[in-house]
Amino acid sequence: MLTLNDITPGKTVRVTRLHGEGPVKQRIMTMGITRNTEILVRKVAPLGDPVEVMVRGYELSLRKADIDIIEVSE
């Protein structure tokens, strides 16, 4: 299983599944990260948290704990 946390900056991936449940999963989906959505990993902070991504034409900064539930394919 490949998660968004495993992707290096500059790569574009497609969401295959969201793990987890409850408010965290709902918040991720509200941000526009749903199945089959393309995500570009723009950059990672020096200490690895947060991660800046581009989704549906806008930029998001996500916590490392949140991106662990996003399963992707290259």
Image: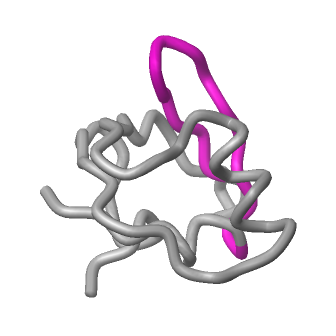
Say whether residue 68 is left or right of residue 73: right
Q: Quadrant of the C terminus?
A: bottom left
Q: Looking at the image, which residue sits at the far bottom?
A: 1
Say whether residue 23 is left or right of residue 71: right
Q: Position of residue 46 (x, y in %)?
A: 65, 56
Say whether residue 5 is left or right of residue 39: right
Q: Looking at the image, which residue sits at the far top?
A: 57
Q: Position of residue 72 (x, y in %)?
A: 29, 64
Say whether residue 49 is left or right of residue 7: right
Q: Which residues are magenta?
A: 51-65
Chief secondary structure of the magenta portion: strand
Residue drawn 71% across the image and 80% down it: 21
Q: Quadrant of the N terminus?
A: bottom left
Q: Position of residue 9 (x, y in %)?
A: 36, 46
Residue drawn 70% across the image and 50% down it: 62
Residue 71 higher or lower than 26, as above or below: below
Q: Position of residue 7 (x, y in %)?
A: 33, 61
Residue 52 higher or lower than 3, as above or below: above
Residue drawn 86% across the image and 67% down it: 23
